[in-house]
């Protein structure tokens, strides 16, 4: 008898769609240039691009949008009031740059003409930014395995019990070559079935998924294209500048071939990671320089949405105060 | 991290029974443990005789992992840490110092890229002598092409070469400078690893004695070590290169060294390859003699948006145009 009531309740469903909509957190959008697609908790965003295509800058900009409060002393900052965990695998994150951009942002939102800013707000924001530096795969795995309770502690300290967090990984392919050449300790008798690289990726994805069970998280990972893909090296730029017309043709023809492929780059991460990713963007620097009055001579960067496929190409410049979409 | 066998003496819970259990999951070291799902291990321990003992062992391993995990810093701590340790070492070339915002940044890796005879070695020698003379710290000089020249150092210190009428005091100061520049001739990447590992051990043991510490590490040029290993199709060459990059960065970061490496830029595709790989691998600041390009990242933010090429006087070599790439 009891079984039947349980069964009936299960069949009957326990909430209407409206109730569910009210319960499920609304999708949120991040700062430009990632503003086109709203994200949900549990999304994994991958930002692909060659070296020096402003990937880390996009991360910093996004982080600043998350650590800022929505309101502070009556001033609208439009932030998300979140903790950000930045896992630095490339080992070249520059905190000074981040601090500088944050200050710019606070001054800009405050709307005051002078260069004063609220020191307490600055400190609050900086303390919401958590940083871990890993210089090999095992340190990365150690980090993922221990992050759960460390995050718990930080959340308690900041008074976010059920808050959302942003986990940033810069960059996920940093140890690719080393892992690819690594082998396990030799086994006596039986052979191991999998390659080291694959096992590592599986462990990374598994530990990240576990972390996502405990914390409401959005993950943004950058990935450098480490296989020879044509991107402007200084001498290419030089060549192009010398023979402007040829360079233009070459670039056009490359664009055509790129449209035929799924990826404009060589994918090297194991499939377990690829299927973990829910959103993918491709950043690159453009050879053109923008010459307008307020963005004088800044290098121009381009950002495309690969997943979901959007036909918009974001153009932005990096200036002292941060990223500006043009 | 260590094989489980070696942990047995320190941690009695990791006994032979536990080791056998781990071996059945092909776990022989803490690294192997990191790659495994702890929940699966715990579940499997439940099916074994004496699961409590096994679980104790697992907990023990987890606490070892916890202790070794890289530290989590918040933005304020990180900034304070960086501010405390950020010093620049002037190179003695006015142009380079201006582009870098005062000189080579401690704790960072700076790469000097350029074609043959663009003054890279001269800039290295001058940096070495300036740092040894003015900063009173030791300089480690890894010379891969027999291009180190004590006569040039003497020249930079302020003596014309071959002068026999040196005053006693001048002689002493020259001797002091030459004493604090330690040159190693290194002809393959494995030798470089040897030297760097030895250096790491030495610095760790000398950490307590503060006098005569190393402030600058120069590798001139790193490309002649890396080019020979990149030829093969396997991943080993790339893995060695990336490891070298991470090792240099780790040394720079942990011991607060300024690291300066030079890299070739030759006409063919191969040479450019090297430059590109190193760029995406490791480099925090990149100097590029005799080439003009705008950039908007990293250290360049100290500069106006379009940095003017500078004209350092680099010894007898042609006056080079120096620009910051990253």
Image (spheres, coloured by chain):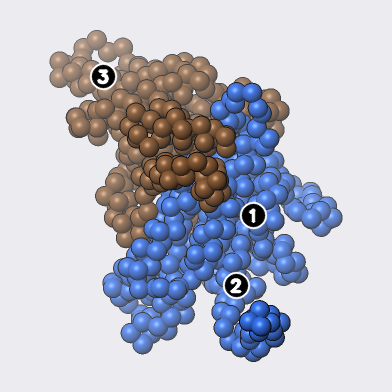
Chain colours: A blue, B brown
Viewer-nearest residue: B62 or A2: A2
Above or below, comparing residue A78 to residue B263 in the picture: below
Q: Which residue lies under the disc numbered 2?
A: A40
Q: Quadrant of residue A321?
A: bottom left
- Residue A296 at x, y percent in the picture: 55, 65
Q: Is mark 1 on a helix, strand or loop?
A: strand
- Residue B3 at x, y percent in the picture: 45, 30
- Residue B44 at x, y percent in the picture: 55, 46
Viewer-nearest residue: B237 or A206: A206
Q: Residue at 36% x, 87% y: name it.
A: A74
Nearer the viewer's eye, disc 1 or disc 2? Answer: 2
Question: With A313 as the anchor, is B56 left or right in this view?
Answer: left
Q: Would you say residue A298 is visible in this rendering?
A: no
Q: Mark 2 lies on which chain?
A: A
Quadrant location, the N terminus of chain A: bottom right
Q: What element carries label 2?
A: loop
Q: Is mark 3 on a helix, strand or loop?
A: helix
- Residue A77 at x, y percent in the picture: 43, 80
**Mark nearer the N terminus (1 vs 2):** 2
């Amino acid at each position: 008898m009891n079984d039947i009531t349980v069964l009936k309740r299960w069949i009957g469903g326990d909430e209407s769609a409206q109730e569910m909509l009210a319960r499920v957190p609304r999708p949120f959008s991040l700062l430009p240039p990632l503003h086109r697609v709203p994200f949900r908790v549990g999304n994994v965003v991958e930002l692909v691009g060659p070296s020096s295509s402003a990937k880390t800058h996009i991360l910093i900009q996004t982080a600043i949008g998350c650590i800022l409060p929505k309101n502070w002393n009556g001033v609208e900052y439009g932030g998300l009031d979140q903790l950000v965990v930045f896992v630095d695998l490339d080992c070249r994150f520059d905190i000074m740059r981040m601090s500088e951009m944050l200050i710019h942002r606070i001054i800009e939102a405050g709307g005051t003409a002078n260069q004063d800013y609220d020191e307490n707000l600055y400190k609050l924001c900086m303390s919401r930014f958590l940083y871990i530096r890993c210089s090999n795969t095992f340190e990365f795995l150690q980090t993922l395995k221990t992050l759960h309770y460390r995050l718990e502690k930080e959340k308690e300290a900041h008074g976010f019990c059920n808050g959302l967090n942003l986990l940033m990984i810069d960059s996920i392919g940093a140890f690719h070559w080393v892992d690819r050449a690594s082998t396990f300790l030799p086994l006596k008798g039986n052979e191991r079935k999998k390659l080291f690289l694959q096992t590592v990726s599986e462990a990374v994805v598994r530990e990240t998924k576990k972390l996502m069970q405990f914390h409401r998280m959005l993950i943004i990972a950058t990935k450098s294209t480490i296989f020879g893909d044509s991107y402007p090296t200084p001498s290419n730029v030089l060549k192009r500048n010398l023979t402007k017309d040829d360079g233009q043709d070459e670039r056009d023809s490359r664009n055509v071939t790129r449209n035929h492929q799924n990826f404009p780059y060589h994918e090297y991460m194991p499939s377990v990671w690829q299927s973990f990713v829910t959103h993918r963007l491709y950043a690159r620097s453009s050879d053109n320089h923008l010459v307008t009055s307020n963005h004088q001579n800044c290098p121009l960067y381009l950002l495309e949405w690969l997943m979901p496929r959007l036909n918009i190409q974001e153009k932005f410049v990096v200036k002292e105060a941060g990223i500006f979409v043009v | 991290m260590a094989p489980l066998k070696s942990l047995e003496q320190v941690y009695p819970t990791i006994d032979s029974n536990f080791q056998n259990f781990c071996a059945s999951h092909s776990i022989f070291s803490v690294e192997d443990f990191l790659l495994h799902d702890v929940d699966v291990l715990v579940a499997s321990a439940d099916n074994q005789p004496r699961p409590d003992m096994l679980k104790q062992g697992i907990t023990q391993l987890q606490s070892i992992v916890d202790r070794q995990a890289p530290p989590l810093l918040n933005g304020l701590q990180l900034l304070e840490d960086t501010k405390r340790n950020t010093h620049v070492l002037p190179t003695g070339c006015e142009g380079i110092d201006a582009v870098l915002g005062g000189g080579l940044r401690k704790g960072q890796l700076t790469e000097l890229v350029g074609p043959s005879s663009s003054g890279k070695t001269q800039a290295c020698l001058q940096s070495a002598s300036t740092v040894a003379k003015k900063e009173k710290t030791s300089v480690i000089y890894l010379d891969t092409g027999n291009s180190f020249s004590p006569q040039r150092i003497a020249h930079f210190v302020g003596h014309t070469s071959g002068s026999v009428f040196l005053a006693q005091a001048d002689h002493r100061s020259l001797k002091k400078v030459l004493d604090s520049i330690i040159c190693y001739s290194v002809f393959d990447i494995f030798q470089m690893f040897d030297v760097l590992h030895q250096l790491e051990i030495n610095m760790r043991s000398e950490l307590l004695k503060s006098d005569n510490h190393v402030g600058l590490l120069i590798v001139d040029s790193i490309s002649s070590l890396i080019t020979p290993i990149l030829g093969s199709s396997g991943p080993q060459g790339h893995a060695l290169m990336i490891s070298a990059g991470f090792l240099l960065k780790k040394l720079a970061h942990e011991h607060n060294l300024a690291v300066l490496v030079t890299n070739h830029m030759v006409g063919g595709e191969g040479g450019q390859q090297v430059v590109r790989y190193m760029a995406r691998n490791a480099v925090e600041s990149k100097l590029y003699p005799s080439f003009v390009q705008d950039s908007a990242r990293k250290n360049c933010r100290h500069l106006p948006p379009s940095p003017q090429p500078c004209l350092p006087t680099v010894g007898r070599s042609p006056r080079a145009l120096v620009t910051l790439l990253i």
